[in-house]
Image: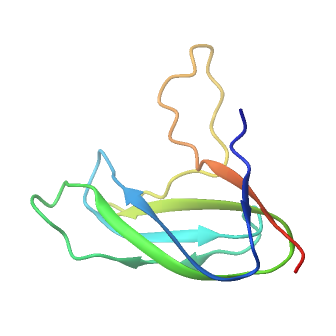
Amino acid sequence: MSRTRVLRPGPCTVDGRAWSGHAPVTAVEVTFDGGATWVPATLDEPTGSAWAWRRWQVSWQATAGRHVLGARAIDASGRTQPVEQPWNRGGFANNLVQRVEVVVLAE
């Protein structure tokens, strides 16, 4: 079992859902290079309560090679998901940006 994803090169849409337990989500940023750079995602209009999950999406031109994708939410209180999680013995309150390796095949 692996979290690694495999794609063909070309345009694709990366999407997901974001939530914060502190304030409504106001932005999502996505990285395609393991966190070296971040690009803004487009948020869908809120549905339901201000505290509801927010759907987001971003276009990506997948190029051959290995990429590490991640997304981080930013909420109305200014909190941003951490790239590194402070260690604790029980692993509690893990809010770390999750990373997914994507292998884009050569054409």
* Picture coordinates of residue 73, whole percent (x, y): 45, 61
Quarter of the image where one finds residue 42: bottom left
Image quadrant in which the C terminus is located: bottom right
Is 12 in front, or is 93?
A: 12
Image quadrant in which the N terminus is located: top right
- Taking the spot 29% from the left edge, 44% from the top edge, the residue there is 21
Q: Is residue 68 left or right of residue 41?
A: right
Q: Is residue 91 left or right of residue 46?
A: right
- Taking the spot 52% from the left edge, 60% from the top edge, the residue there is 72
* Picture coordinates of residue 6, whole percent (x, y): 74, 59
Q: How many marks?
A: 0
Is 13 in front, or is 28?
A: 13
Relative to 60, does residue 80 appear above or below in the rendering? above
Farthest-out residue, top: 89
Quarter of the image where one finds residue 67: bottom right
- Taking the spot 67% from the left edge, 51% from the top edge, the residue there is 99
